[in-house]
Image (spheres, helix red, strand yellow):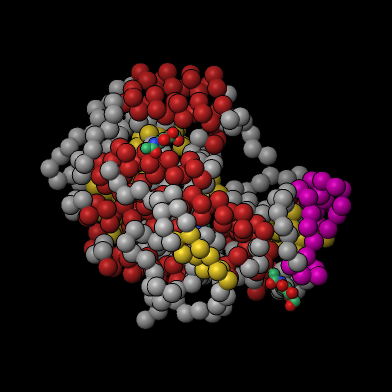
Amino acid sequence: MVRRLCAVGAILCFLNLVLKVRDVVAVTKENPRVCIVGAGYSGLGAARYLKDYGVDNFKIFEATKHIGGTWRFDPHVGTDEDGMPLFTSMYENLRLNTPKLTMEYVGYPFPEGSQSFPTGVCFHKYLKRFAKDFDLIKHIQVDTKETRTEDCDFVVISNGEFSSPVWPKFEGLKLFKGKIIHSHDYKDPEYYRNRRVLLVGAGPSGLDLAMHLSNVTAKLVHSHHLKYNQPFFSDTYVKKPDIRKFTSNGVYFQDNSFEQVDDVIFATGYDFSYPFLDKSTGITATGKFVLPLYQHTVNIRHPTMMFVGVLQKVFNCVKEAQGEYAAALIAGKFKLPSQEQMLKVWMTHVHDVMAKGSSIIDVNDIPDSTGMYYYFGNLTAEAGIYRRPKVFSAIRDHTVQFRLENLLTFRDYDYKIIDEEHFVKWYNPRPGNPCPFDE
Ligand SMILES: Cc1cc2nc3c(=O)[nH]c(=O)nc-3n(C[C@H](O)[C@H](O)[C@H](O)COP(=O)(O)OP(=O)(O)OC[C@H]3O[C@@H](n4cnc5c(N)ncnc54)[C@H](O)[C@@H]3O)c2cc1C
Ligand SMILES: *[C@@H]1O[C@H](CO)[C@@H](O)[C@H](O)[C@H]1NC(C)=O
Ligand SMILES: *[C@@H]1O[C@H](CO)[C@@H](O)[C@H](O)[C@H]1NC(C)=O
């Protein structure tokens, strides 16, 4: 399982180092130049708020030729048609796993009456429409393959968090002769038709692929340790515990049972990845954590650098709030506390994480729904940004549980917020419902 990467003592050691460094804190400049990294949901959201706050001197740098980030389905595997690495992890027939109201930008909902769990393709169309309607396209610099240097007064980093696959290590894995992929590279079930497939992991991708594959494969062997209300997938679906070791044609599990399989899919999650940040940024980023960030957003050592999307286990719309917070800071709507004060706040957070028995790898998590509500509250109290009402906490509590209890049907419900604290949901299956953004 997760390794304890850092003991409390080691963190304090690290902090002493940080505290010795004094930086010049952000300037308020007439017309600051802002550089946003990545044109996905987070980058586009931040850009919209820059415009709202009257900052027009910004550019979104996008590593691919496309906008919409991970929501764009690309049939290529590994690299795109230009040989550039593919960041998107989208697959065919994906539908949202959280109701769309957790992902819609403020004041920019889907049309009334559209289903709560549209396809990923549809959500991508929504993002493209958003970029167009807020006149963001002209600010986006897509990949040109040339290298040049840009000066930026502020940098907003929003390069996504689900692009760098976690590859688990197992004894004998090298011996295995079949095809092995990570769910990052999974596109559609066709290759797996009538084959015996080992699927590893039961996070959102693992459970989704179990549904997509179980009636296609000759046998689907699913290794995971999630406790949930497992539905009937198919007669050929087999649940297995964690893996012990691989052989050339199969796999042993912790209960010593063996299964012969043709292919393996690791749905084993993603690491943070900031290959473009060097030491001078003052950020410690590993695959598992990014620190020290004030309000999970501001680089404490260089407060002109902000991160959108590092915070985990919260609804997508938190990324939008972080984008608004960053924009408000850049526009000079509020001032950050001193670096000492920011570190103090951050250390209190680290202390709380540790006190709960977690380790430093949880430093970017808000594990419960009240935490998410208070996080919105903290951003609002400091920066005056829009606060999502309490009902979002109720929706988070409900949907996380409901999905695990009704895996095959949870997307057949529609959700509606009725007031600050309450929502309603009703059964309304609409397979093949058209996307409201189709031309
Ligand atoms: C398969 C899948 C399903 C998901 N389903 C849901 C869901 O149902 N509900 C939900 O709430 N969340 C879901 N998510 C989470 C999803 O990550 C967020 O919804 C959100 O889209 C993330 O947006 P982002 O802009 O932070 O990152 P991304 O969408 O990853 O966008 C990042 C952008 O940055 C670009 N980029 C990367 N590196 C660089 C660089 N060095 N320079 C310039 N640009 C760079 C990328 O090309 C990309 O365009 C899902 C994620 C995945 C992978
Ligand atoms: C697979 O097909 C069977 C029989 O039609 C059905 O009962 C089951 O729900 C299907 N499985 C999934 C995951 O859709
Ligand atoms: C800020 O967060 C803390 C910790 O979660 C919480 O106790 C506090 O009430 C929050 N502030 C607001 C205004 O919500």
Q: Is residue 427 left or right of residue 435?
A: right
Picture residue at 51% right of the left edge, 63% below the top: 424
Task: Please state the horizontal and vertical placement of residue 11, each as a whole percent of the image.
Answer: 50, 23
Q: Is residue 403 left or right of residue 260?
A: left
Q: In which quarter of the image is residue 427?
A: bottom right
Where is the N terminus found, in terms of image quarters?
top right
Task: Please state the horizontal and vertical placement of residue 165, each as a whole percent of the image.
Answer: 56, 51
Q: Nearer the viewer, residue 97 or 145?
A: 97
Tally of marks? 0
Picture residue at 35% right of the left edge, 28% below the top: 342
Q: Which of 293 and 150 is in front in this view?
A: 293
Q: Quadrant of residue 408?
A: bottom right
Q: Is residue 222 left or right of residue 56?
A: right
Give the vertical position of 369 relative to 82 (above or below). above
Write down the region rendered in magenta: 233-259
Task: Please state the horizontal and vertical placement of residue 136, each as a whole percent of the image.
Answer: 26, 62
Whether residue 348 is visible: yes
Q: In which quarter of the image is residue 92?
A: bottom right
- Magenta-span inclusion, residue 269: no
Give the vertical position of 156 relative to 52 (above or below). above
Whether residue 40 is visible: no
Quadrant position of ligand 2: bottom right
Q: Nearer the viewer, residue 327 or 258?
A: 327
Picture residue at 77% right of the left edge, 70% below the top: 234
Picture residue at 66% right of the left edge, 46% below the top: 168
- Magenta-span inclusion, residue 258: yes
